[in-house]
Amino acid sequence: MELALGTVQFGLPYGIAGRGAPVPETEVRQILQIAHAGGIRLLDTAAAYGSIEERLPALCGSLQFRVVSKIPALPGGAELGTVEKFVADAVHSVGHRLGDALYALLFHRAADLLGPAADSAWRAALDAARPRGVQLGVSVYAPDEARAVQKRFAIDLVQVPANALDQRLRDTGSALDGVAIHLRSVLLQGLLLMPVAEAAARVPAAAEPLTRWRRWCDERGVGTLQAALAIVKGMGVASHAVIGVDSAAHLETILDAWHASAPLQAPQLACANLDVIDPRRCNAA
């Protein structure tokens, strides 16, 4: 498994433990340099992340990255012909902004590939993306969504949350054989690294599972960052884990922990409470 770098923090205030403002451009350039030097070659972005998608090529400069971006949510109530044009225009726009760096496009909302306009949307994406050699997939909030989409369309890639508390993929990832899997929310928006009292004040439902999590780390003498990354590695079904950072020092710390961590499994830490593991419910999507 390899690390990929998320870019939402570069375009928007993001995450429970974030800095409360987009990362300044000078810091972004430094982060990208450190990422490349540390072996990261994949970036994750979206048109919904402020202006970062269109700014990425200039920020990367001569650094060679592949980029995964997103097809925005379909307009509600649109006729099928309008949906096809919307998707085609979105693909062409992203291709224009990112050029040859564009590696894959994900439908940003899984419901768009499960609703009445799904066939039109997928056909338009195929027609626009395949000539560019761009892979297609979907970003989901649960493995079940990914499997439902896979039953309808031959997706290449899925992005799904997974972390020490959200281990749904550990039990179901094999059902996505043949699909590349990228993990996101691997630190649960930073909750896994925060003091329990502070995290519980922001997400009250997380108090008990985070207390268990801290006890598990303390008993093994492992820091929370290294443990969180080790458990993600231990899931073993993904090609990449997408991490977000808000400073160069933050990225360096994560890279050190990533290289120091060996895969671990801790099924006893899994939490089924969606108020804890679904980023939308903890107001950090």
Image (cartoon, rainbow, N blue to C red):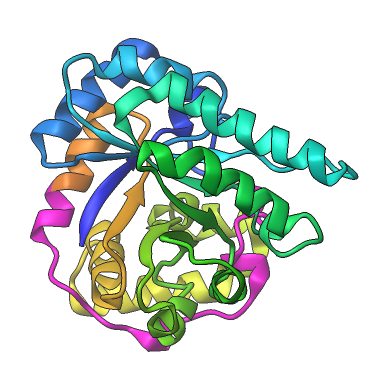
Q: Position of residue 6 (x, y in %)?
A: 38, 40
Secondary structure of the magenta portion, mostly? loop
Left or right position of 152 against 104: right
Residue at left offset 30%, top offset 30%: 101
The quarter of the picture where residue 37 lies is top left
Q: Nearer the viewer, residue 249 or 237?
A: 237
Q: Relative to residue 31, is residue 233 depicted above or below?
A: below
Q: Is residue 48 visible?
A: no
Q: Relative to residue 273, is residue 118 depicted above or below?
A: above
Q: Position of residue 230 (x, y in %)?
A: 23, 68
- The quadrant of the image that shows the N terminus is bottom left
Q: Nearer the viewer, residue 127 or 231?
A: 127
Left or right position of 199 against 257: right
Q: Position of residue 190 (x, y in %)?
A: 44, 50
Residue extent of the magenta highlight: 256-285
Q: Nearer the viewer, residue 90 or 245?
A: 90
Residue at left offset 30%, top offset 28%: 100
Left or right position of 217 against 107: left
Residue at left offset 19%, top offset 34%: 35
